[in-house]
Image: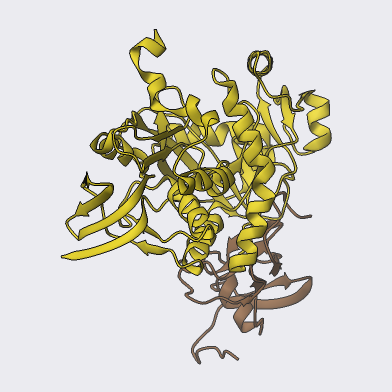
Amino acid sequence: MFRRLPDATGDTVAFTIDGKRAQAYASDTVAAALLWAGVDHCRTTPVSGAKRAPYCMMGVCFECLVTIDGVGNRQACLIPVRDGMRVETQRGARAIAEES
Amino acid sequence: MIREETEIAVVGGGLVGTSVAWGLARLGKRVTVLDEGDNAYRASRGNFALVWVQSKGLGMAPYAAWTVRSSNAWARLASSLNDETGIEVAHQRPGGLTLSLSDAEHERRVAQMQRLHNQSDMIRYPYEVLDHAQTGKLLPDIGPQVAGSIYCPLDGHVNSLKLFRALHAALAARGGSYRPNRPVETITSSSGAFVLSGPWGELAASKIVLAAGIGNARLGPQVGLNAPVRPQRGQIIVTEKARSFLPYPLVTVRQTDEGGVMIGDSVEETGFENVVTLPVIASMADRAVRMFPMLAGLNVVRTWSALRVMSQDGFPIYDQSVTHPGAFLATCHSGVTLAPNHAFDIATQIAAGRLADDLFPYSARRFHVPQAA
């Protein structure tokens, strides 16, 4: 769905989305990395179960919430992706305790 | 200027006013609710949403029976509202707990429950005193500092915003009229009719019900009623929505039907100042985390404060005017818990023109000096 700008360059990092390996630029946020990886929704809402994906990309809309390294409801658009990061999409409300 | 007429005018569009108004509309009465605007001090939008029984009635045992009656009628209220509006207000009654964080606090709470239940005219209902281990069987996620708890199977909770919406929808469906932005300034009466007026115009009614919360203190005396109530601040924290972890409501922590965790609720005498203060919020959060350490990982999404409508002894005021027959007054700080009583009992009595004798203890006459001395 999304393409990189033609002048995008940099080091790449490897991370996982729901256990599957993915790649991104080290300068990407987790949200950008998810979009580049072709993830079309990163969570479902706690109340209606509707699908949600990164939207504002600047920390305002809270649509891009994902579980990162076991901690739920992280704002993917505000967190730089890192090598070895474990990103999980969310179904409904987050768990309170860390997920292993 | 607007000039309208109705059969019964209810002043106040909060939980108390809409409960009574809906009850009256169900009895076929023509009802108009006059309300302030969104800038009103509105306890109905800020409350903690418990349907709570345990601990209520120390100093006025009939209030315990009144509360139990309402708690028992809550399922009927929820299903009636669902039938009439399709809105599910998420009423649950799994029982509720009061947790203590030290042995001294636990002993104080147990002694208070014993004093409550030792009152001669006290209604009997079950409750259990649980130690740490017994509390842990109900609530596996409690922290080591929880000394014990009191469990009462009559306690429950509801989504109070959905309740508020359902009451408004049900009132409208029954033909009741809701008029926002119509603050009432003066009430006059002549030859059995009342005229309520404000900057918007006036409304004539043959009966009036004052359910204006703190505003009742100002309005009551205009029709021979007395409502010495004051604002009492309570602050509340709500977290992001999380997966269900708390199967029972606690008096200060509950998880809503949609997953948010509400942490409340302070008791502060600060007049009309409905702001949030960090030291109070921090202390509430600290107590909640000591009860459930896992809460420390949750993000807070909102904090707010609201003003309880508090009488001198903390109990409701239900009254009817001797000098101005047809004028009634209802005010309390438990508009959620008591909603069924207001909709079913108080409304029926007002429709009949007279409050029942068993509501006499709630008259503001109890505050008169000879009564109090």
> Residue B128 appears at what percent x and percent y?
78, 25
* Residue B268 coordinates in the image, percent (x, y): 41, 29
- Nearer to the camera, B108 or B140: B108
Q: What chain is the brown one?
A: A
Residue B108, image quadrant: top right
Q: Residue furthest front?
A: B191
Q: Residue at x 42, y 45 (%)?
A: B43
The residue at 73%/71% (across/down) is A16
Q: Residue at point 67% right, 61% down?
A: A93
* Residue A57 seen anywhere in this rendered image of the structure: yes
**Viewer-proximal residue among B89 and B320:** B320
Q: Eyeballing the image, is B206 above or below A40?
A: above
Q: Is residue B239 above or below residue A69?
A: above
Give x and y (percent) for residue B33. Answer: 37, 57
What colour has chain B?
Answer: yellow
Q: Is residue B144 visible?
A: no
- Residue B296, image x, y percentages: 62, 42
